[in-house]
Image (spheres, rainbow, N blue to C red):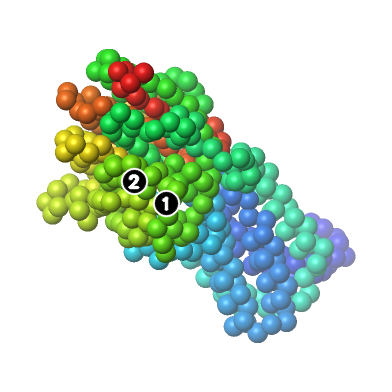
């Protein structure tokens, strides 16, 4: 046992530390606890949010509890928006615009979102309860101890989550000179679909550049079938990307970094669908989700699409649907509509644009094709998450290969390109992909070479 004097000094020291410990617990540990869980998988750097929680704690020493509660809840909302927008390659402002489409989503299809939401609610409730209970202690907290604690949390958050290519990839891409698969593949600079050829452009959801050549070859294997290689020459490459899916669409269709909101109000003549329409093409856009999502039913016509087929037109009651956070028609079924549009023989060349849907993350268990034995260690991809996503890409590529190898299909140039790298939450999932780039494949009829 400690001598009585030493015991008294230790007790007084502990009592003196209580205000600081209470402050750190309420305003630094608990608000950040749900996000600390992301350290195990990977997330954006949250230094600003951590500072905001610290400042609210300092204000809580003087402001009424009601005001503090409002400021805290607003900061939690900002924190969540920042994390989610970062994961999905959106600015916070763009993510706010996307919220109006939240009714179309099924977040409960993902256990990740459910667990994160539950942890966030519990931690926020604990902060508010303890903030009221310990309010009298906060004025006596040691500013130096509080500042050191905040610095330690920010250092840990930055050290664990900092991956330059993912933390700054958007900035790097945005600052880079514009480029696209349409340009790099040669469809810009020549008359796309020349000599009456059709043109098919497929933008594949979350298709990123795999670092491992063997993994890339496995995903692209459907285009190495004899039925395809005998009819088409194949060129592959990579191009930079910036932003989310709609930014990827505008990159390929309109030749610029941009926001779809810039195209909502009036027609524009410079985008590829409009140019091909003026050249006599029938222009068709196909997507398995609702046309109201991101106002595609409004801006697709403005960039030159004469016909649009969304889930409202593609899916009929009684037909199967593909589950996920974005539930809609199945890409493997939509491929039939793509083939039907390309096969039209009315003397008019066809430009068909297909934006795929089902490879949104997280992959729903019912959406897996079970082609690659992804259970456990993840098969040939050494990652179950990446393997399951690759199954969906392969499924789409097999259907594209089926469509373009159909005997009698009019000569068709085919460009397949990713919209953005897959937004994995985990470091392990991200590590499989090259940052800031998406792959593309160009197939051209051999008679046109």
Task: Examine the rendered structure and indicate whether residue 350 appears above or below residue 212.
Answer: below
Q: Position of residue 2 (x, y in %)?
A: 82, 58
Tag of residue 185? none
Q: Position of residue 40 (x, y in %)?
A: 55, 44
Q: Quadrant of the N terminus?
A: bottom right
Count of number-bearing discs: 2
Residue at position x 26%, y 27% from top?
411
The CA distance from mark 2 to mark 1 is: 9 Å
Task: Find numbered disc 2 in the image and state the secondary structure of the residue it sits on.
Answer: helix
Residue at position x 16%, y 38% from top?
346
Q: Nearer the viewer, residue 59 or 97?
A: 97
Residue to which mark 2 is pinned = 278
Res. 65 in view = yes
Residue to which mark 1 is pinned = 269
Would you say 185 lies left or right of 293 here? right
Res. 98 in view = no
* Contact between labelled residues 1 and 2, with CB atoms less than 8 Å apart: yes
């Amino acid at each position: 046992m400690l001598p009585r004097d030493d015991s008294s000094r230790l007790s007084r020291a502990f009592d003196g530390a209580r205000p600081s410990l209470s402050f750190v617990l309420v305003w630094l540990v608990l608000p950040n606890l749900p996000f600390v869980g992301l350290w195990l998988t990977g997330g954006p750097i949250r230094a600003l949010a951590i500072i905001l929680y610290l400042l609210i704690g300092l204000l809580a020493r003087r402001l009424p509890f009601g005001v503090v509660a409002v400021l805290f809840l607003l900061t939690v909302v900002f924190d969540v928006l920042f994390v989610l927008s970062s994961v999905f390659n959106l600015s916070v402002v763009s993510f706010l615009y996307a919220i109006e489409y939240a009714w179309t989503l099924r977040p409960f299809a993902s256990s990740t979102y459910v667990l994160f939401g539950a942890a966030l609610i519990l931690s926020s409730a604990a902060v508010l309860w303890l903030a009221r209970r310990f309010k009298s202690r906060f004025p006596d907290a040691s500013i130096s101890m509080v500042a050191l604690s905040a610095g330690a949390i920010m250092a840990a958050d930055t050290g664990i989550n900092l991956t330059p290519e993912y933390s700054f990839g958007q900035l790097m891409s945005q600052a880079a000179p514009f480029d696209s698969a349409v340009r790099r593949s040669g469809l810009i600079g020549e008359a796309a679909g020349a000599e009456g050829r059709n043109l098919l452009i497929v933008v594949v959801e979350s298709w990123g550049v795999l670092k491992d050549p063997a993994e890339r070859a496995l995903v692209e294997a459907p285009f190495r079938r004899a039925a395809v290689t005998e009819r088409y020459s194949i060129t592959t490459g990579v191009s930079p990307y910036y932003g989310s899916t709609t930014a990827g669409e505008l990159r390929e269709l309109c030749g610029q970094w941009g926001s779809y909101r810039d195209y909502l109000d009036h027609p524009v003549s410079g985008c590829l669908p409009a140019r091909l329409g003026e050249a006599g093409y029938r222009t068709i856009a196909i997507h398995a989700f609702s046309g109201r999502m991101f106002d595609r039913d409004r801006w697709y016509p403005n960039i030159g699409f004469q016909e649009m087929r969304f889930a409202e037109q593609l899916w009929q009651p009684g037909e199967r649907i593909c589950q996920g956070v974005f539930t809609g028609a199945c890409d493997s079924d939509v491929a039939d509509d793509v083939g039907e549009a390309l096969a039209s023989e009315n003397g008019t060349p066809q430009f068909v644009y297909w934006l795929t849907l089902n490879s949104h993350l997280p992959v729903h268990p019912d959406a897996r094709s079970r082609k690659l034995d992804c259970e456990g260690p993840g098969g040939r991809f050494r990652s179950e998450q990446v393997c399951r996503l690759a199954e969906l890409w392969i499924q789409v590529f097999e259907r594209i290969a089926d469509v373009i190898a159909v005997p009698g299909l009019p000569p068709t140039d085919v460009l397949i390109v990713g919209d953005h790298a897959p937004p994995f939450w985990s470091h392990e999932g991200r590590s499989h992909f090259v940052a800031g780039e998406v792959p593309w494949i160009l197939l051209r009829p051999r008679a046109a070479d």
